[in-house]
Amino acid sequence: MEPIQSAMKRWMKSNKKIGETYQAISEEVLNDPQIQAILSEHIELDENDINRNLMKLYEYHNASKDCRNCPNLTGCINILKGYTPHIELDGKDISLRYERCSNKVQEDLMKEKESLVQSMYMPKQIRQAELTELKTDSYERKNVVAEVIDFVQNYTRDNFRKGLFIHGPFGTGKSYILGVVANELKKRNIATAMIYMPEFVRVMKSSIQDDSLQSKMDHFKNVDVLMFDDIGAETISSWFRDEVLGAIMQYRMTEELPVFFTSNFNLDQLEKHLATSNRGDVETIKAGRIVERIKQLSKPVELEERYRNN
């Protein structure tokens, strides 16, 4: 058995180190100019109160205030990343209140902006499209860019403006224009939903299985600006044309909510496509109703020249 004297010596040595550490922390905290300023405003706090709340003061002392000691949000040194501490007193009890720092505020604003653009199976290049990258090297392209600028500058939720039905052959940059519109509207806190039409048909059909069809339809009915990319590229059923696409467009027409479209077909060609279901049935009247709603919701513009990167 270890002699009692040896155990006592080790215990005293350990406690001495603890005492020295505590004293060093206390001196470090109380020499902090910010803490000195706070304590000078609260002379009611005595030595016992300060010792009792020392760990809170130590946490405040070591924290980065207003991002001064953090290179960026990822490198934040605080216990709660992205939050800066503030000392609060309740009688003689000290507590810390954490608020978002400037870096966190900026990140949250960016995420909030990004969430305004929802896309379903749209390529990254389209999601990141910029107005400054749009080419204006022909009359028809200048006309389309002018229409885009006019819409994004003048559209408000209280002032209905038609979207665009952009049609033309593959490779003319139609989808890219949708991305530009979405990102420009994002800057004005206007929400958009971009949908690649063939995948949209598949997703809505599968939604019947998990009972999410109605909630999805309600979302697309009510989003500020809706965009259908490549309408006419899908093979559709009468059910999808009439009960899904028709219902969404009817609602948006009634509520004056704009829709953008891109298609390889002009409106006459699209009407013929929509008239024939995947079962081979031809229903010209129902297809005509869809096209009529497209006309009510958007303005046709044509792009014939292929998009050149340089």
Image (cartoon, rainbow, N blue to C red):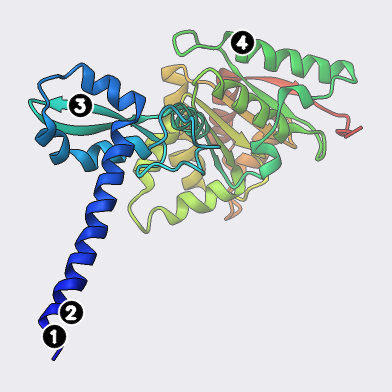
The amino acid type of the residue labelled 4 equals Gln
Q: Which residue is labeled 3 in the image? A: 88
Q: Tell whether 212 sits left or right of 154.
A: left
Circle 2 packing at 10 Å, graded few (<14), some (14-19), many (20+), is few
Q: Estimate the spatial distance between the alpha carbons at disc 2 and disc 3, rounded to whole Å.
A: 46 Å
Rendered location of residue 127, percent (x, y): 64, 37
Q: Is residue 96 above or below residue 9?
A: above
Q: Are marks 2 and 3 in contact (CB under 8 Å)?
A: no
Q: Which residue is labeled 1 in the image? A: 3
Foreground disc of the pair 4, 2: 2
Q: Tell whether 117 sits left or right of 206.
A: right
Q: Residue at x 57, y 55 (%)?
A: 279
Q: Which residue is labeled 2 in the image? A: 6
Q: Which residue is labeled 4 in the image? A: 153
Q: Quadrant of the C terminus?
A: top right
Which tag, 4 or 2, sits closer to the chain's start?
A: 2
Q: Estimate the spatial distance between the alpha carbons at disc 1 and disc 4, rounded to whole Å.
A: 86 Å
